[in-house]
Amino acid sequence: MKKIYLLTALAFASLGVSAQKQKLAAKEMNVEVIQQPTVKPTAQQKVTVWSNDFSTASQWAFSNLTNDNQDWVISTSTSTSLGYSTGAWVDPSNTVTNENGYALFDSDLVGTNNGNQDAFMTFTGSIDCSMYPNVVLEFNQRVRMWQTTETIFEVSNDNGATWVQFPVNLDKATSTLYQENSQVNISSAAGGQANVKVRLRYVGSWDYAWLVDDLKIVEQPAYDLRSLAPFVAGTNNLGIEYGKTPVAHLDASYDIGGSAFNFGSATNTNTVASVNFGAGLTYNYSIGSILTNDTIAYGATETPNLTVGVYNGTYTVSSTEEVSGSALFANNIYNRNFAVTNNVYAMDGIGVNPTSTQTTTTLGSDSFNTPTGTIFGNMYHLRGGNTNNVVVSLEIGISSATTAGTSIQVAMIDTATFFADGYQSLTDLNGNIAESDFYTVTAADVSAGKITVFFPQPVALADDAYYAAVLTEVNAANIIRILNDETVQQPSYASMIHLIGDATYSNGNAFAIRMNMGVLGLDESANANLSVYPNPSSDVVTIESNMTEGSIQIIDLTGKVVANQTVNGVATAFNTAALTNGMYTVILTNGSTVETRKFIVQH
């Protein structure tokens, strides 16, 4: 199935990028799902007016406007290949009754190249909502959207003569898998009506799939305030939200805020939002009154005093009518986390994100049908000055679908070079600021779920924005699958994909491509954390540090790791007798701190 990866228009002037234009191209894409949480319905007191679990097929009629076989079906399939690997229900909490049937439109299965789809699935009975002026349609769904996809519920109150559309999933990112319990307010068409009909409608053109189960019409509560879309982004980071930021690269100020949505039938008054990251970092915002179905954004530019640690943020909205302890207060709170580190810079928040919202998939060398290779990159803003803008290595989070023996390369790339689309092969790297030798992925890397590739020598950079990139060939036998954090939607230019010989496309999420930062120009007297002696060394070199946990690696001038050992107490000795004469770099890390030191082997 052909997929189009769209790079939306960017503010290239603000990036210092020239001559880059919006691009479209047909690409084969394969997304691997690592984790997709089931979003549970909020516990509440509510009246169920009508429900249907698709266990009785005769209650539904099927039709389409394309005069072909592109119809909805009632399915019990558990296949992971449904909808171009959209897959069937993953339901560890047993909240979906998919075992007895669910509604399925498999756009990939029934689609054709350059075709179109417009199909309906209509409840043949009539629903009485006359006693309920405010009603909500509630449903479980599993869905992946594409640029042509429209997922719609339609409601009639005149026995099907006319239909009112209620589009859903308009906020969903393309190619991203969602499984959740959702709701849509249908009061304008069904509220107070005695003869209500409901139908599902799918419009598309050879896309993914939409799975729906456990339809309910429930009475809409009077007060149901919800916290949505929390954000915390450095004011000068172009809207990028980093999962981990080294102290030296924190922005001077941060834009903090979110949105409050009133899903209840009555107005909320005196609405306020509170953002609390602990450690005295609490910010309060006045929103005022919110009418039913309205969404109001809040926030401001703040100057938090940040130190090393994990910040677990809670974004809470409340009002006179809905306070802590109210029946529906659980969805008034949204969690949003980030971390400050000594030396690790990561756009993804894997391991930092709240477990209830973390969503992770992967993309990799087998995701596209470009035979010449692929470059995956994240944009990072460096502002630590000459001393702190030193990149020692890149760490790449990978899934178990990665195969040992795969060859990759890492590079630091200027933003203008990345967007110039000038690469024709993996050996054509003109303009890269720095690059490693090719690295062969080991079985230990796959088992660990990460790869660390060192540059031949630490890369010193000026204050600016750069892409930390992974370059990989396309080989059916050798695959790398890079973790892709979908928990926080990122600007289109934050995380990118360059298909060599083709063009650059937006990821829209955050690859697990992280930078391990070092410190430039430290000598033994200045660096109390790391000492290397004797220097020069002939037979044995001793590495001494105040770190009691972590790993020590020694790399040569090509970036090859010649020694790798777990930290063993205060001092660790290495035999250097087998090493050739020359300069080597010691890398000491405990996962959050990276220290580097050079020494010379001289026999």
Image: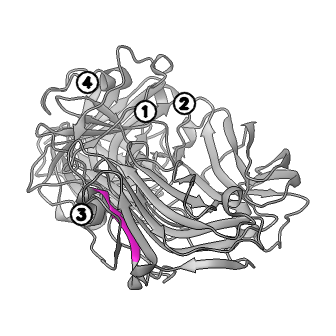
Which image quarter: residue 120?
bottom left
Identify the residue under disc 2. Answer: 238
Q: Residue at x 66, y 32 (%)?
A: 252
Instruction: For marks 3 and 1, give the CA distance.
Output: 29 Å
Q: Along the polypeptide, which appears first: circle 3 or circle 1?
A: 3
What stretch of residues is rendered in magenta?
102-107
Q: Residues within 10 Å of mark 1 (few under 14, many from 20)?
A: many
Quadrant for the C terminus, please: top left
Q: Along the polypeptide, which appears first: circle 2 or circle 3?
A: 2
Q: Nearer the viewer, mark 3 or mark 4?
A: 4
Quick check: is 479 in the magenta stretch? no
Quick check: is 103 in the magenta stretch? yes
Which image quarter: residue 373?
top left
Between 387 and 422, the residue placed more toward the observer is: 422
Query: In the rendered structure, which amino acid carries the disc numbered 1?
Result: Tyr
Identify the residue under disc 4. Answer: 421
584 relative to 493 in the view: left or right: left
Query: In the rendered structure, which amino acid carries the disc numbered 2?
Result: Leu
Q: Residues within 10 Å of mark 2 (few under 14, many from 20)?
A: some
Q: Residues within 10 Å of mark 4 (few under 14, many from 20)?
A: some
Q: Residue furthest top?
A: 19
Q: Nearer the viewer, mark 2 or mark 3?
A: 2
| Labelled disc at residue 253 | none
| Labelled disc at residue 493 | 1
Between 64 and 55, the residue placed more toward the observer is: 64
Q: Residue at x 9, y 49 (%)?
A: 475
Question: Measured along the vertical axis of the image, is residue 427 above or below residue 603?
Answer: above
Query: In the rendered structure, which amino acid carries the disc numbered 4?
Result: Asp
User: CB under 8 Å between callouts 1 and 2?
Assistant: yes
Label 4 element class: loop
Tell me residue 525's x, y (percent).
47, 39
Identify the residue under disc 3. Answer: 446
